[in-house]
Amino acid sequence: MIFSRGAASRWKGFLGQYCVARHCKPRHRRLCSTQLAPRTLAELQDLCDAVSTPIGGLDDLELSLDQFRGRLTSSLVTQAIDRCKDEAPTRRLLRFFSWARENLGSGLEDKDFNYAIEMFAEKKDHTAMDILISDLGKEGRVMDKQTYSVVAEKLVNLGRQGEALGLFKNLEKFKCPQDSATVMAIVNALCSKGHAKMAEGVVEHHRSKLIGIEACIYRCLLYGWSVKEDVKQARRIIKEMKSAGFMPDLFCFNTFLRCLCERNLKRNPSGLVPEALNVMMEMRTYMIIPSSISYNILLSCLGRARRVKESCQILDQMKKSGCSPDWVSYYLVARVLYLSRRFGKGNKMVDEMIEQGLVPEHKFYYDLIGILCGVERVNHALELFERMKSSSLGGYGPVYDVLVPKLCRGGDFCKARELWDEAASKGITLSCSEDVLNPHITEVFKPVTKVEDVKPLICMIEEPPLQNSRARGKKKKKKKKKGYNKGMK
């Protein structure tokens, strides 16, 4: 879903842009932009060839590097890593960097050491990252604030928030100051995964270093409690924010609204609409107009709760309040209509969106066509595909890949062949094989009951059950006894 799976990453990205980027140095590659001399370029190519070759192990790599006769510099090492990071395995990069450290010694600059740590963190080789951080401290080098921000984020994502906090407490060991930038980095990293209580502890101990970034800190803490779906604590942060003289903005109210809706979705679905509307009313008292994102948060939760009637009512109320729905709003309502098999109303929603001149992303058609195929309404999926083609949106390949096999399994090989030829005429190569169009290969109707499970009719006229045979045996014994008694008489 648009607002369930990918929402957290987008909100986190917005939070990072709003807060962290304002107080930390912008990330840059730290590489020399000037053109290299021909000799230096040849030396760089020799290093890249040795590192990126897939032949040989790590010891062979080191032997190859020992044969390097050029002038090794700190910037040359960084440029070689930058060129090879997408081709060579991280273990070969780590061995190359270790070899460069042994040969350069103190000639390796701190900024290039920091660049290597960031590169391994971004490549998700956390063992290499830990090794270089340890070596950075042992050699008394300086850790950049930007590097600490990247490392803290990766450690928290790994569930090692204790180590990220411990590294923050020992930043003096790495000659990195505990200032507003580093405090913001650890608070943002902790809150992004819902560790708001731990982040509040950091804030409490470093209040004197937060002058000028208090609003960003409150936003981070509010987001952290919303990830935990703790409405009470999120409301407390908003109250503290007001008391400190910082009025909540649209981002803060949308964050709180999301927290409230996610909690009600799990515990009180009937309270979704009234409590969300109360928050929107509160927003208006602060002269903050709810946006389409605000309504889409509510529509997303209503759709997951299958509250069809309320979803349509919220969309109508959205229009009456002067907030124009975007394509996501129509998608969320059409999705729940299709899932509840109200196909006529779902088609009207799509037509209304097109009439409004809204151009959706490919995901709109991909998801809805997939839902229609899943509920066995291929005819409606074909109609929706025609609307997609009429909009000249492009990107039809994934739709053909879904519809062609679906039509073949339903026995409509003629329509499937028509779509196949249509895709070929547009130069689209489908991922499914052309064998799917062969009725002798594709299974059309799956049998309801296996043939082996059906008992043959002859079973009904076989010998009588064991109980009847026993009864007949008892009758014979009685007859024998009667004959014996007659003979005695």
Image (cartoon, helix red, strand yellow):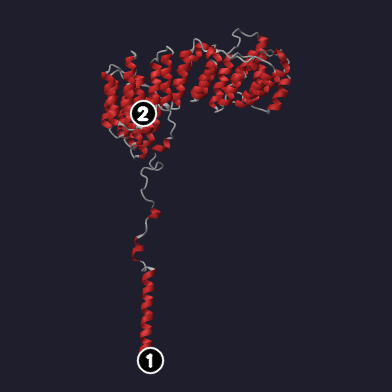
Q: Residues within 10 Å of mark 2 (few under 14, many from 20)?
A: many
Labels 1 and 2: the sequence-earlier one: 2
**Residue 225 coordinates in the image, percent (x, y):** 45, 24
Q: Residue at x 51, y 10 (%)?
A: 211
Q: Which mark is residue 488?
A: 1
Which is nearer the eye, 367 or 125?
Answer: 125
Q: Residues within 10 Å of mark 1 (few under 14, many from 20)?
A: few
- 472 to 71, vertically: above or below: below
Outermost residue, bottom direction? 489
- Of tags 1 and 2, the one toward the viewer is 2
Q: Which mark is residue 301?
A: 2
Residue 299 appears in view: yes
Q: Secondary structure at mark 1?
A: helix
Q: Can you say which quadrant of the picture contains the C terminus? A: bottom left
Q: CA distance from mark 1 to mark 2?
A: 93 Å
Which is nearer the eye, 257 or 475?
Answer: 257
Which is nearer the eye, 233 or 58?
Answer: 233
Q: Amino acid at mark 1?
A: Met
Residue 17 appears in view: no
**Residue 200 coordinates in the image, percent (x, y):** 50, 21
**Residue 446 coordinates in the image, percent (x, y):** 37, 45
Judge left or right: residue 106 versus residue 362.
right
Outermost residue, front direction? 243
Q: Amino acid at mark 2?
A: Cys
Judge left or right: residue 425 versus residue 55.
left
